[in-house]
Image: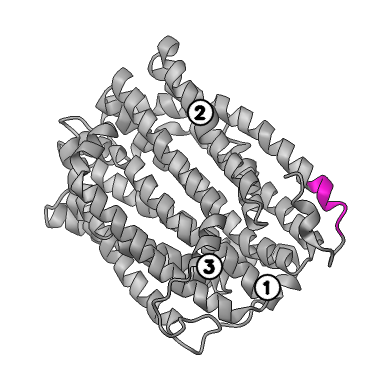
Amino acid sequence: MAAPTILGTEKIGKLLKMYAVPGIIAQTAASLYNMVDSIFIGHIPEVGSYAISGLAVTFPLMNLSVALGTLVGVGSMTMMSVLLGQKNYEQAGKLLSNVLSLNIIIGGIFTLFTLTFLDPILRFFGASDNTLPFARDYMIIILLGNIITHLYFGFNGVIRAAGNPKLAMGLTLFTVISNAILDPVFIYVLGMGIKGAAIATVLCQTMALSYSFRYLSDKKNLLHFPRPIFQLNSRIAKQSMTVGLGPFLMNSASCIVALFINQQLGRYGGDLAIGSYGIINRITFMFIMIVMGLTQGLQPIAGYNFGARQYSRVREVFILTTKWATLVTTLAFVVSEFLPGPAVSLFTNDPELTENAIHGIRYMNMLIAPVGFCIVVGNFFQCLGMVKTSIFLSLSRQLIFLVPMIYLLPLWLGQDGVWVSFPISDAVSVLFCLFFIIRLFRKFKKLNDGDDPSILGGAL
C-alpha cells in the first residue's frame, strides 16, 4: 500500500474520480446487496407481501446496528485520513487496533441485548401477528452475525481511507455477487425462505472479512495491525467516537424515524403500507448510497488536505462533490415521479402493494433533488472535525423536522400525511444547509494555504 501523498498533489477532479468511483461502485453494490434480499423475499410464493412487510419492520433495528457501526467506523476512517496526511503511521496502526476491539465489544453487547428482547422490540417497531414470524426469523440470524458485519464494514472503510479504494470496492462487489448467487439457493432451492436470505448475507460478509483481516495483518502494507493486535486506547477510542458521533446520530435518527413511520403507516394503512415503505426505502436508498459513495471519495481528500493545510483544495473537492451528488438525487426524483411502476415491480407482483408503493414514492420523493447537497454538506463538516455542526445537520432533516410532521399531518391527511412529511422536511433542511455552508465558506476566504485552521472553529 503506497503512502497516499497524491491526495495532496494530484488534481482534485482526478482524485475524486479515483476515490469516488470505487466508493460509488461499492455503495451501489451495497444497496444492491439489500435490494437483492428484498427482491427475492418479495417473490416468495404465497407469503411474499407479508415477508417483505416483515423485512420492513426490521429496518429500525438494522439502522440502529448500522449506527453503532458508524460510531466506530466512520470516525476512525476520518481520523485515519488526517493521521496519514500528517504521516503519523504509528498512531494510525493503533487506531486500526481500536477499530477491531471496539467493534467486537459494541457489536457483542448489541447482539446480546437485542436477542434477549427481540419479540418485544419488533412489536414496538410495528410488527403484527402476520409479519412478526418473518421479522424474527430474519433478525435472529442477522444478529448472530452482527459482530462480523460491524468488522467487515469497519475494515472496508479503513482500507479505503488508507489509500486502497479499489480493494474496498472489490470486497464489496464480491459480497454482492456472492449474495445474489446464494440468495435463490438458500431461499428457493433449500426452501429456507427469509432465513435463507439472512444466512446468505452473513456468509458473504464472513468471507470478505476474512480477506480484509488477512490483508491488514500483512506487515508489507503501510497500514497493518500492530502487536498486540487487540488494543483499546481510551484516548483514541474517545477521539474516533467523537468524530463518528455525527454519522452515529444520523443513523440513530434513521432508526427513530423508521420506527415512527412504521407505527403511523401501520395505524393508517396496515401491514401492506409498511411493506410499501420498505419498497420505497430500497429504491431511494439506491440513489442515496451513490451519493454516500461520492462522500467517501470526498472524505480522504478533504481530510488529508485539511490536515496538510491546503484549504484551496478542500474547497475545490467540496464544490465538485456537491455538483455530482445533486445530479444523482435529481435522477432519483425523475425515477420516483415518472418511472415508479417499473421500479416497484422489481419487488412485488401484488396489485395492492404495488399501487400503494407507487402512490407513496411520488409524494415521498417530491423534493429529493437537493438532498444530495445536504448529505455532502453534513459529511464535509464531519471531514473537517466540526462535530457540533455535523451533528446538528445530521439530526435536523430526519429528527427535528420530519418526526413531528409524521405525527401531525396524518391527523388531517391519513396515510398520505406520512408521505407528504418528507418533502416538507427536505425543503427546510436545504435552507439550514445553505446557511451553514455559506457561513463556513466566508471563513475559508480568510485562510491561505498553510495558515492555522483554528480560525474556523470560533463561531461554528
Mark 3 or mark 1, earlier in chain: 1
> Residues under labels 3 and 1: Cα distance?
17 Å
Q: Are marks 3 and 2 in contact (CB under 8 Å)?
A: no
Q: Which mark is residue 402?
A: 2
Q: Nearer the viewer, mark 3 or mark 1?
A: 3
Q: Nearer the viewer, mark 3 or mark 2?
A: 3
Mark 2, residues whose alpha carbon is within 10 Å: few (<14), some, or many (≥20)?
many
**Residue 151 to residue 459: above or below:** below
Q: In the structure shown, which secondary structural element does the residue marked by tag 3 occupy?
A: helix
Residue drawn where x is 23% and y is 33% of the image: 123
Task: Please indicate whether residue 459 sits to the left or right of residue 297 in the image.
Answer: right
In this view of the protein, can residue 38 be seen by the observer? yes
Of all residues, the one furthest to the bottom in this rendering is: 220
Indicate the amino acid at tag 1.
Gly
Q: In the structure shown, which secondary structural element does the residue marked by tag 2 occupy?
A: helix
How far from the left and from the top, in percent, is residue 313?
A: 77, 62
Indicate the amino acid at tag 3.
Ile
Q: Quadrant of the C terminus?
A: top right
Mark 3 or mark 2, earlier in chain: 3
Please give the range of residues in magenta: 441-447
Residue drawn where x is 40% and y is 80% of the image: 229
> Residues under labels 2 and 1: Cα distance?
38 Å
Task: Please indicate whether residue 414 sits to the left or right of residue 188 in the image.
Answer: right
Where is mark 1, residue-wise? Answer: 85
Where is mark 3, residue-wise? Answer: 236
Q: Quadrant of residue 275?
A: top left
Q: Are marks 2 and 1 in contact (CB under 8 Å)?
A: no
| 295 or 240: nearer the viewer | 240
Mark 2 or mark 1, earlier in chain: 1
How far from the left and from the top, in percent, is residue 443?
A: 82, 49
Instruction: Indicate the colouring scheme.
Output: one colour
